[in-house]
Amino acid sequence: MSSAFVLNSLLVITCVLVALEVGFSIYERKSFYTVKDTLYNFYLMILNTALAFGMIGITIWVLDLFYAHSINNHLTGFWYWFALLILLDFAYYVLHVVDHQSRFFWAIHVTHHNSELFNLTTGFRSSVFQPLYRFIYFIPLAMLGFSAIDILFMHSICQTWGVLVHTKYIKRMPAWVEMIFVTPSHHRVHHASNILYLDRNMGMFLIIWDRIFNTFQDEVEWEKVKYGLTKNVEKITPITVWNHEWIAIWKDLKRSDKWSDKLKYIFYPPGWSHDGSSKTTSELREEISLGFTPEHLKI
């Protein structure tokens, strides 16, 4: 079975499932989709895909460069692919955590979160500029003896799973699945703007990393998920949909005099401020633990 056949099959399955979800949501008169939001999802996917194809040569060249000097992992067959799956998913987990914990990278990743809806096409709502640096996180895999083509193939498979968990139609999966894999319930939490849920469930395929590194949060009945950002974009346009956080960073840079503060506005966690006018996720959670209610918090 060729890699092309596998990827084409996954693409067909994804398209069929999207069509079914759209059909069911219309039939059941659920407000899961809007034409405008869906068009923006595809628009961002096209921008990301175009840049990814533009970067493919550089990506393969860099990974092959490290692969040429890699160790021999002596893995073949099933164990080769199994090890690659585990290691690649961990690499993505690290990338995803950085995207959420450094405002510079959050400004790139935020496009995936600035929709107030949640459906399968939200999975297409890509971080436009991520292909410019994503391959850096794959370099350790190449050094461990995994070829560039195999890394990109496995990443595509994991990304397909990452798209399919963007749905409200699956409430819970069997307990053993929820324990090991990222599920729709886990990913609904990830897309929430509730303080309880912020910056949680970073995994793409496996949820075990979140459980190990204490970034896991279960979806609970008493805290209904609110999708979007803590401060949603006032007016979405084809430009502001991907540059609004860069504009916000620029405004913050202009209102701080110290160069150390300017650097913190760029690279510290989103929400950091030199004067306490806004809060990071950690600061918001600390205030809740001290007895403040969400409506009293500065976000």
Image (cartoon, helix red, strand yellow):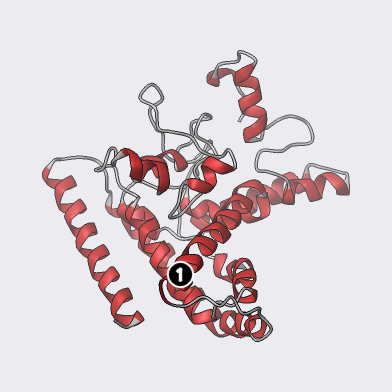
Q: Which quarter of the picture shows residue 184?
A: top left
Q: Secondary structure at mark 1?
A: helix
Q: Quadrant of the C terminus?
A: top right
Give amino acid for label 1: Trp
| Number of residue marks | 1
Between 35 and 268, the residue placed more toward the observer is: 268
Left-right relation of 175 to 142: left
Judged from this view, the residue extending furthest toward the top is 291
Identity of the residue drawn at 71% across and 38% down: 272
Judged from this view, the residue extending furthest toward the left is 27
From the viewer's perspective, is residue 175 above or below residue 81?
Answer: above
Identity of the residue drawn at 41% across and 71% down: 78
State whether residue 174 appears in this view.
Answer: yes
State whether residue 243 appears in this view.
Answer: no
Between 262 and 199, the residue placed more toward the observer is: 199
Residue marked by disc 1: 79
